[in-house]
Image (tube, rainbow, N blue to C red):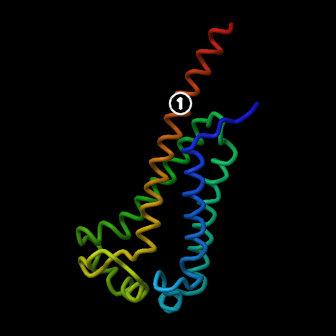
């Protein structure tokens, strides 16, 4: 049985691959003004950074594994739910940690000092609001995650249509 891999699946895998690289690199590998690994190391312990990195890598690898296994095939409902809900949970964390404090100030006061310490010397293009600003690297990550969520929705919806048409073919066969 040959697979008909959809563009949305390919793009989703590329997006998740970018997020994986982000998870591996963000706190460990200096990439110019996009991060400040020394400032992060001064703010967080080695064990904290290791746990954060490994948990992020494992989460994305699980998502990528599901996409790779089911690319071009019908996704089981539990995989569809896992792909969607897991990314939504990560995005809710992004909103709580970055965008709600930045845009509305809720929780900003407890993040200002830490964020300025870790990200104060990194590149950003948005204006500072409520004492913080998402840096460019995190903004790119957040946008990529949002795009991956939309791609996952596309995969789920197109998979459902594909599944329904296969059901009709099977039903008409008997």
Q: Measured along the vertical axis of the image, is residue 154 above or below residue 10?
A: above
- Quadrant housing residue 51: bottom right
Classify residue 148 as left or right of residue 2.
left
Identify the residue under disc 1.
Answer: 160
Q: Measured along the vertical axis of the image, is residue 7 above or below residue 34?
A: above
Q: Position of residue 144 (x, y in %)?
A: 47, 60
Q: Position of residue 43 (x, y in %)?
A: 47, 89
Q: Position of residue 166 (x, y in %)?
A: 62, 21
- Name the quarter where the C terminus is drawn: top right
For the residue labelled by badge 1, is the local secondary structure a helix, a strand or a loop? helix
Viewer-proximal residue, 65 or 126? 126
Classify residue 173 as left or right of residue 131.
right
- Name the quarter where the N terminus is drawn: top right
Q: Residue at x 43, y 86 (%)?
A: 118
Q: Residue at x 40, y 89 (%)?
A: 121
Q: Residue at x 55, y 41 (%)?
A: 80
Residue farthest front in this picture: 7
């Amino acid at each position: 049985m040959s697979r008909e891999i959809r563009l949305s699946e390919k793009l989703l895998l590329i997006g998740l691959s970018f997020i994986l690289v982000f998870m591996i690199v963000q706190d460990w590998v200096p990439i110019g003004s996009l991060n400040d690994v020394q400032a992060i190391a001064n703010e967080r312990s080695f064990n904290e950074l290791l746990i954060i990195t490994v948990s992020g890598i494992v989460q994305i690898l699980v998502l990528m594994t599901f996409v790779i296994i089911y690319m071009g095939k019908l996704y089981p409902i539990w995989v569809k739910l896992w792909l969607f809900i897991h990314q939504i949970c990560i995005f809710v964390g992004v909103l709580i940690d970055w965008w709600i404090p930045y845009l509305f100030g809720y929780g900003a006061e407890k993040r200002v000092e830490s964020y300025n310490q870790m990200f104060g010397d990194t590149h950003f293009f948005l204006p500072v609001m409520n004492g913080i600003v998402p840096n460019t690297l995190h903004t790119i990550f957040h946008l990529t995650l949002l795009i991956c969520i939309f791609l996952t929705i596309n995969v789920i919806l197109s998979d459902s249509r594909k599944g329904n048409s296969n059901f009709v073919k099977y039903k008409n066969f008997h």
